Amino acid sequence: MAGLDSLRQEFRRLFGAEPRAFRAPGRVNLIGGHTDYNEGWVLPLAIDRDCLVLATARSDRRLRVHSREFGETIEAGLDGPAAGEHHWSRYVFGVAWALGGIGVPVAGADLLVASDVPHGGGLSSSAALEVSTAFALSGLASVSPDRAKIARACQRAENGFVGMRCGIMDQLASCFGRRDHALLIDCRTLDVRPVPLDSSRVRVVVANTMARHALAGSAYNRRREECEEAVRRIAAVRPGIRALRDASWEKIASLAQDWPESIRHRARHVTLEIARVHAAAKALESGDYEALGTLMLESHRSLHEDYEVSSAELNLMVELARELPGALGARMTGGGFGGSTVNLVRAEAVDDFTASLAHLYESRTGIVPQITACRPGDGAGEIV
Ligand code: ADP
Ligand code: MG
């Protein structure tokens, strides 16, 4: 991220001290939609956009945090109540609280947050903020907990302090990203395996529809409950099944015939999507980007028809993209009901693809989309 010097200056102006600087990237998920909280696999990459947290320690147990994007400073005691329910500072205070839970001796700090990960666009600006805050507070406490523990603590912060039941993928991707690799993540064991993604051959393009529908959060929570309901139904017949990750569609299809249609469709999406993630990782390993693209299109269809988390704008963005020269695949990414699509595009076609997609989408909807070409980048750390 550009502008570290000017951020250091801003920090000195705000807090009168020389800070240490930490960064954590946003992420985009190539394939594996809604498999994370079912303890399945996902295939995200950390992107070359970051949230920076500049930090110095304080001698009291207070946090003072300024967000450049929100132009606001919040100060409160580490143990005291943080700002209102949906306030951005809850991510920061939530991380301080959750780090305490994994034994990091968090002390007071002054923090400056600045991010070039767009908010609410499917690139997980929230995980970038959490993870960079976690690295900053751990760094000030002179401890380096392992990355999987940091990711878990950040997830706990978002679940318990912000009230969003997110899975673990975003935080793991932000912690473990590797340049020119995607990450095959087992969301049960938290095993992370980098898989090569050759950015000289293909690029990952994120297209934000700039349309988000109300109730996305509550619908997301409802999908999780529906998956839990499917697990209860399977476990009643096959004890030992703890999550949809333990089932395959082949084995549960006949069982599911008597279920309510919505529960059957949710389970079908999750189990087949997990199979697609494994096929996608194999395709990446052998450099078969056409095969990966086809799997992404199948994933989108399943998220739309079986999981019912797409939207008219997401469907349009996918339909427009797949017809363009150099397009290999496209699907919605993130929680759904708006937000972004992720596209796999031949490297040499990426500029024309981006311009044409923006033009076509705007002429069909009147909405100017935000389209970002990404490269897989490195995970979080201190900037030294
Ligand atoms: P996404 O993670 O997809 O970008 P979320 O709704 O999960 O969308 O997270 C966005 C929220 O994260 C913002 O509304 C804000 O509360 C917080 N956030 C992200 N980046 C910053 C930032 N630079 N400064 C303060 N808060 C931020
Ligand atoms: Mg988020």
Image (cartoon, rainbow, N blue to C red):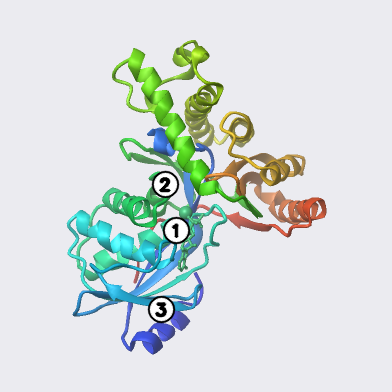
Q: Amino acid at mark 2?
A: Cys
Residue sitting at the far top: 254
In x, y percent, where is residue 212?
A: 62, 52
Q: Quarter of the image containing the C terminus?
A: bottom left
Give the vertical position of 145 relative to 223 (above or below): below
Left or right of 29 on screen, residue 166: left
Residue at image location 45% in from the left, 15% down from the top: 252
Asked if disc 3 is less than 8 Å from ligand 1, the answer is no
Residue pointed to by mark 2: 166
Q: Amino acid at mark 1?
A: Ser
Element on which disc 2 rests: loop
Residue 134 visible? The answer is: no
In x, y percent, where is residue 178?
A: 42, 51
Residue at image location 21% in from the left, 66% down from the top: 106
Residue 190 visible? The answer is: yes
Residue pointed to by mark 1: 126
Residue at image location 32% in from the left, 84% down from the top: 18
Give the vertical position of 322 relative to 105 (above or below): above
In x, y percent, where is residue 361?
A: 76, 51
Residue pointed to by mark 3: 73
Q: Residues within 10 Å of mark 2 (few under 14, many from 20)?
A: many
Left or right of 41 on screen, residue 242: left
Circle 3/circle 1 CB separation < 8 Å: no
What whole-number distance in Å separates the C-alpha atoms at marks 3 and 1?
A: 18 Å
Residue sitting at the far right: 363
Residue at image location 40% in from the left, 46% down from the top: 165
Circle 3/circle 2 CB separation < 8 Å: no
- Which of 290 and 135 lies nearest the eye of the viewer? 135
Q: Residues within 10 Å of mark 1 (few under 14, many from 20)?
A: many
Asked if disc 2 is less than 8 Å from ligand 2, the answer is yes
What whole-number distance in Å separates the C-alpha atoms at marks 2 and 1?
A: 10 Å
